[in-house]
Image (tube, helix red, strand yellow):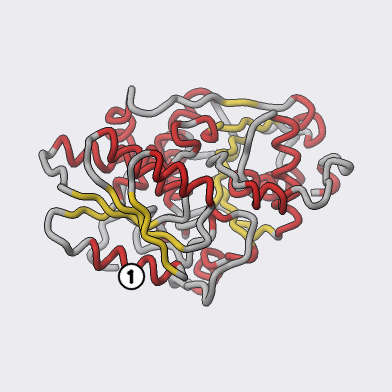
């Protein structure tokens, strides 16, 4: 990791300028009922309303636009993804008329795979994520090919950080910022943006307990990998490990939570109901951390929650709603 030069807020600032007019400036939303129940003000950055339905378009577009500025656009693009990054790369590549191939697992979300192909990219499916990752590394060695990684790259982190920049500019002063963690690109960019713009605000992450490689890494002080394919509703956070660029930034977080599957389903149902948005489980997962924070924070504190995406397959939706959790309203005493 000695040759890894981490991104800085200057990279996010450059990305913010670069992406103007290329991605949506998504709104901040809130629920007065949820605010009343928790005794805090919770603002949601609705990246589920972003082009391709997730924040990932920011990193992919920043990556390619920077290459275009440097006259280094490739003949072919490859990427590895569990879904949202695949769509983002496919869309960004189509905007520049560059062919793309996405390497993913055979259990990739059907709705995400279909959208990826709709945007013009080819899909190469493999039994496991490590096999898909190995295949994309080999493909990236072909002449004229550029690999756009899903999270472990300075320009990806910088692009994802622009979501937090927008949120903080729109929100004004806040006390805490929350984001989900898969590979850590969004959370790393969120950390850099918050430290630069509102250094007194806490930055807090969350990941599935069933895919807790980041938590294990933070506990051991080195990057740890999952031993198998995780079984979690939050498929967008099912990455096998964080990366050399994201891990040092994740180590600077103020807090980090592991969220069980019941809490993931619970908060996905409630956010869909309260915000009237199609929100995927990875987005809603952070609310378990928000509920814990709300217990300790001074009353009427303000938090921003980055809702990372809204792409959900029929199969995932059925699992999320197997049990009706709307009979148990969220309260600060039950967090």
Q: Nearer the viewer, residue 282 or 245?
A: 282
* Residue sitting at x 80%, y 29%: 36
Q: Residues within 10 Å of mark 1 (few under 14, many from 20)?
A: few
Local SS, label 1: helix
* Residue sitting at x 18%, y 41%: 67
The quadrant of the image that shows the N terminus is: bottom left
Residue 158 in view (yes/no): no
Q: Which residue is mark 1?
A: 134
Measuring from the top left, give residue 82's x and y in whole percent.
Answer: 47, 55
Residue 37 in view (yes/no): yes
Q: Residue 279 is drawn in which quadrant? A: top right
* Residue sitting at x 57%, y 26%: 28
Measuring from the top left, give residue 35's x and y in whole percent.
Answer: 75, 30
* Residue sitting at x 16%, y 62%: 142
**Placement of 158 over or under 151, stated as above or below:** above
For this orientation, the residue located farthest to the right is 327
């Amino acid at each position: 990791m000695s040759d890894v030069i981490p991104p800085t807020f200057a990279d996010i600032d450059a990305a913010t300028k670069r992406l103007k007019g290329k991605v949506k400036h998504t709104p901040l939303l809130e629920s007065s009922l949820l605010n009343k129940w928790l005794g805090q003000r919770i603002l949601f950055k609705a990246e589920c309303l972003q082009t391709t339905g997730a924040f990932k378009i920011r990193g992919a577009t920043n990556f390619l636009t920077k290459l275009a500025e440097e006259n280094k656009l490739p003949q072919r693009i490859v990427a590895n993804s569990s879904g949202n990054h695949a769509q983002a790369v496919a869309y960004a590549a189509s905007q520049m008329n560059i062919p793309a191939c996405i390497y993913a697992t055979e259990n990739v979300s059907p709705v995400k795979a279909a959208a990826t192909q709709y945007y013009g990219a080819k899909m190469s499916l493999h039994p496991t994520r490590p096999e898909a990752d190995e295949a994309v590394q080999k493909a990236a060695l072909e002449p004229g090919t550029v690999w756009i990684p899903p999270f472990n790259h300075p320009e990806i982190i910088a692009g994802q950080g622009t979501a937090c920049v927008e949120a903080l500019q729109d929100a004004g002063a806040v006390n805490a910022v929350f984001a989900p963690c898969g590979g850590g690109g969004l959370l790393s960019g969120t950390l850099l943006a918050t430290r630069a713009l509102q250094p007194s605000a806490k930055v807090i992450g969350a990941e599935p307990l069933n895919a807790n490689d980041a938590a294990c890494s933070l506990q051991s002080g080195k990057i740890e990998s999952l031993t198998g394919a995780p079984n979690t509703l939050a498929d967008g956070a099912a990455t096998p490990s964080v990366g050399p660029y994201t891990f040092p930034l994740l180590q600077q977080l103020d807090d980090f939570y592991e969220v069980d599957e019941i809490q993931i389903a619970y908060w996905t149902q409630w956010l869909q109901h309260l915000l009237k948005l199609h929100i995927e489980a990875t987005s809603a997962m952070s609310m378990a951390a928000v509920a814990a924070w709300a217990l300790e924070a001074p009353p009427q504190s303000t938090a921003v929650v980055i809702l990372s995406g809204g792409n959900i397959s029929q199969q995932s939706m059925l699992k999320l709603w197997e049990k009706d959790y709307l009979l148990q309203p969220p309260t600060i005493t039950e967090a």
